[in-house]
Image (cartoon, grey):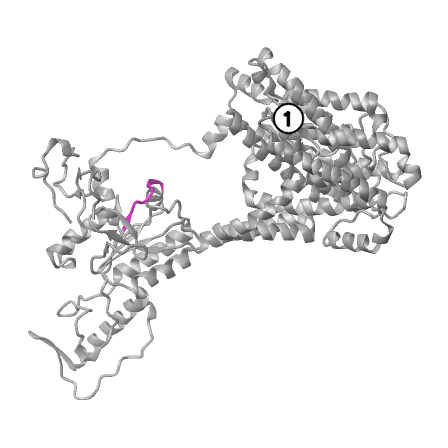
Amino acid sequence: MMRPGAKQYMVARPLYSEESFAEEHEKVYRHRKTMLDHVKQYFTCDSQRAKSAALSLLPVISWVKIYRIKEWLLSDIVSGVSTGLVAVLQGLAYCLLASLPPWYGLFSAFFPVVVYFLLGTSRHISVGPFPVLSLMIGSVVTRLIPDDGLEGPPVNITGLEGLSKDEQRVLVASSLTFLVGIMQLAMGILQVGFVVMYLSDTLVSGFTTAAAIHILVSQLKFVLGLQVPGLSGPLSIIYTLEIIFNKITSTNVCDVVISLVIMVIVFIVKELNDRFKSKLPVPIPIEVIMTVIACGVSYAFDFKSRYGIDVVGHIPKGYEPPVAPNMHIFKETAVEAFPIAIVGFAVAFSVAKVYAVKHDYTIEGNQELIAFGVSNIFGASFKSFAASTALSRSAVQESTGGKTQVAGLLSAIIVMIVTLAIGFLLEPLPKSVLGAVVIVNLKGMLMQFKDVPYLWRRDKPDCVVWMGTCFASILLGLDLGLAAGLGVELISVVIRAQFPRCSVLANIRGTDIYKDRKDYIDIYEPEGVKIFRIPSPIFFANIEFFRGKLVEAVGFNPLRVLRKRNKALRMIRKLLKKGDLQWTSKGFLNTSCGPIKESEDESNMEELDLPTDFKDLPVRIDWNAELPANIIVPRVDLHSLILDFAAVSFLDISALKGLKTSLKELIRVEVDVYIVACDPYILQKLHDCCFFDDEVQPSMFFLTLHDAMLHILEKHPETTEKKSDYEKIMTTVTIHHPGGNLRSRDRFSQGQVPETRF
């Protein structure tokens, strides 16, 4: 029933097949660019393209020209100072994750920021150490330079002779970072920033949650004051926990108390910051405050000597001279460098996109790759480790009013001041304080566990990707876990594409709308007509599934029916030749006295797959009527099949072959097949691939599903026996003489509009 007052529309137009539409409406010719055209355009250079390229490589030029000094400078100063203080603390803390001396984290919070200021397109992210990357670098460092007490260089790496263990580790981290930067720069130059699209939000969420677990476990040794060697590789987290539990009786109580106090206070104040962020001019920098207090108390009471607490220790003033990367380390770390490059860029780009949408500006993925690549190459030359963006630090920069990367540059200046002048004040800082700060900042990543019930209810394959990535990353390590997560993600995509949810459609009474017949009550299905919908591309992996579902939808196997019919024809010809069967005016007459056995001759099987041939028979066989000589052939009540290709975006060669085979099998058992809503690209591909022949013809393609249905009802009037059945498929789309124009209902009264209703 149509609800009272519902709006209606009525369209009067011809019934269109693809052929009739093409004859009546001339198509505009458009030149399709070939791969060669794209290559020529890419390498064509003129003054305008050169200018655009220069501006794109130095985005700072674009936004500096529009910088509003009076409106933005004060906000950027406040944001830069706040972010710089947090960057100092996080640089020290995250450096512990990388298994490096803490002060090298200050280098990572300075050099990459300066380069990103010039090359980056995001105005709000804070570049520098990121805990997940730090941990991934730390696993490589401990693999090559393990905590075994030996001071000599690894036997498989040259160029580390004469260096202390810390110096060896710094060289490994900086060389790895240099290689990461080269990979990111190469991907940016080659314009392959799209690779991050294969890291879905679900995969990244599961991966970062697992990374948070690894980070938490790695910081327990600082919180508990234990000497635990750094481990890497599969099950390293299990072995680390085993060592911690074995040494739990050696826990430094003072470290535990300090850590608990720091964690409780920082957690409470952070919650207050979140709750009252609209009322606070800037978030309370509680980590910085607690760090200053901890430094003062540790220095005043000499925690290191009196309680055996491990502190940051000596922080050298100034910056060290640049060093060249070790090429032998490149060879040892190439496998781990690629996931570090991808994860670092993916996280930074995701955060940058959030702020770009919020503040209404655009970022460019390939330029971001170039920016991070150059940042890491430049930073690695000065002994910093791989940079990305920390979510909490970026939130500080944005929430304190940062408008541009001027805030980032000012934060780097704060870090530089600490490095050059006042770093010595941080020397008595207990490492347990840094560990506690790191653990508290894991809250956001650990809370992602709440996504699991939601994903399970909404999208189970995505939930499997999340759990597979998370558990694989926890047990196998972050590099192998990321690879396993990608594998699970690709498998989920393949399964969805390989096993799409095909459906049989039916007409919604009184409309030109067709829906899944299982979902609605008020439907109408003309006898002898089936509508089969394919909701995905058809390609080599799912063509057999599609053919199987098609057989299931029509209710019979057309190839089997065709073979049965050809066997029946073979038997009828044999009986006619013997004289056991005669044709009379009343039909076939069986003149045989004995029972007639069905021939079991299986020779010339390929002939059974050919179209049925009635040339040498006195009459065409009606396969749904009673056959002579008690021959039994499966009954086929279907006379028309419509394939809805509206959701089919492409077909490959394997799919074309399989589709053509299925169409021929159906046509040979006297089922008319129609394909509707086919994409013009696919239709053109069918022509180019010589898809059509005497059996499969272009005339089977119709513009819309309803056009095909009206054509079928006109061709098979016996399909709808009663006038009331016609009204069940009544629609505002009507059939008119060819060449009829689209008419507006407003030009005719309801009784004047010429229409044929179905």
* Tag 1 residue: 397
As drawn, which residue projects farthest toward the bottom?
594
Whether residue 332 is visible? no
Nearer to the camera, 256 or 56: 256
Q: Which amino acid is tagged 1?
A: Gln
Query: Residue 122: percent from the left, percent from the top?
Result: 59, 26
Query: Residue 411: percent from the left, percent from the top?
Result: 70, 23
Nearer to the camera, 722 or 545: 722
When the figure is inspected, residue 649 is found, relative to residue 104, above or below; the finding is below
Q: Which residue is rendered at x = 33% and y = 75% of the image?
A: 602
Looking at the rendering, which quadrant does residue 585 occupy? bottom left
Under circle 1, the secondary element is: helix
Mark 1, Cα crowd under 10 Å, few <14 / some 14-19 / many 20+, is: many
Q: Which residue is rendered at x = 14% and y = 40% of the image?
A: 738
Residue 255 within the segment the image draws in magenta:
no
Query: Residue 230: percent from the left, percent from the top?
Result: 80, 47
Q: Which residue is rendered at x = 89% and y = 30% of the image?
A: 300
Question: What residue span does the magenta drawing correspond to?
Answer: 675-681
When the figure is inspected, residue 402 is found, relative to residue 748, above or below; the finding is above
Query: Residue 567: percent from the left, percent from the top?
Result: 27, 73
Q: Which residue is rendered at x = 20% and y = 69% of the image?
A: 623
When the figure is inspected, residue 575 is found, relative to residue 336, above or below; the finding is below
Nearer to the camera, 633 or 340: 340
